[in-house]
Amino acid sequence: MTEAPYISLADYAASFTERSEEAAPAYVHPTGPPVHLTEGSALAERLEEVLDTVVALQRADWMQDGLYLGPRAMGHVYRDLLECARTLGVAVPPAVVSGCSMSAQGTFGTNDRAFLLLSSFFVRGADEAERRFVLGRLCGHIHARQATWNTLYALLVDHNGIRRVGRRYLGPTLEVVLAPMSLGARLALSRWHRAAVITADRAGLLTCGDLDGARRALLRLALGVRPDVDPADYLDTLRGVRSNDSPARWTELLASQPWMHKRMQALELFARSETWAELGGTPHPAPISRERLDQRTEALLRIR
């Protein structure tokens, strides 16, 4: 009898451990959701309802030219998804594969009803470590309960046309909900989202367990192809050309994620940390403390 190619439901269920819904995973970079954007307003009562509706419409739109992952639909990728969900201890989320761009990949929905969008262009050329890094980082948004705010941010910036789809079907209703969100809200969400990207990258490293594979995946996400360049050389090149005195640095204030060289450096810091070792990673000969990890990561995220 040959070994079953997929994880059994019993095996998956047995891998769960009890944990508080309020407890943040240990790998989360500390940053609270910008609750002041909705606190004490009618928007709080409608936010998840509107997000669920818009995301359902957008998912249906993506499914016109996509497919759901499953044992008989890109089974090797589905198995990677099962392993990533098992590693993080989350329920296996639905995942749609579409011919979207690599930068459009994301976690959409709400904290209790989320799904993943994957790019067929990324999946096709990725090795196992690269796939598990991307799948793991998207599952990390669910594990860290970031899906609701992540989707709200996607609506504000019209990520992959999600706001246009919502406007097409919901009309003025969507704009009534989003209108109170000023530039200040966009700034606050942008900063939160940059920190959430760092958290997701850490989840991706935990699920793939391979720093080199994670860095290769980040390079593919940045450049669209697997470049013939060592990640260390890539970082050295960026360090040589960037300038803290350039006005262009202020564009990061409204950027959806930290610049790629910052993400790669933040990931390397995490792989050297005591937190990484405590979560099962290979200990570094000179590990840095959690406090030092937070300080150095925050310094990377700072606009200066």
Image: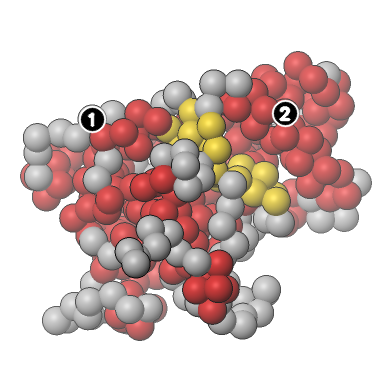
Residue 168 falls left or right of residue 44: left
Residue at mark 1: 225
Residue at mark 2: 57
Q: State if disc 2 and disc 1 touch (CB < 8 Å).
A: no
- Counting from the top left corner in percent of width and height, residue 238 is at 17, 40
Choose top left, top right, bottom left or bottom right for residue 222.
top left
Q: Which residue type does callout 2 highlight? A: Leu
- Counting from the top left corner in percent of width and height, residue 208 is at 31, 60
| Whether residue 50 is visible | yes
Residue 84 falls left or right of residue 52: left
Mark 1 closeness class: few <14, some 14–19, many ≥20 residues within 10 Å:
some
Dot placed on the residue nearer the N-terminal end, 1 or 2: 2
- Counting from the top left corner in percent of width and height, residue 204 is at 38, 57
| Whether residue 197 is visible | no
Residue beneath the point at 15% across and 33% down: 227
Residue beneath the point at 41% across and 45% down: 75
Q: Nearer the viewer, residue 152 or 211?
A: 211
Q: Nearer the viewer, residue 8 or 194?
A: 8
Mark 2 closeness class: few <14, some 14–19, many ≥20 residues within 10 Å:
some
The answer to whether residue 238 is above or below residue 139 is above
Residue beneath the point at 31% across and 33% down: 124
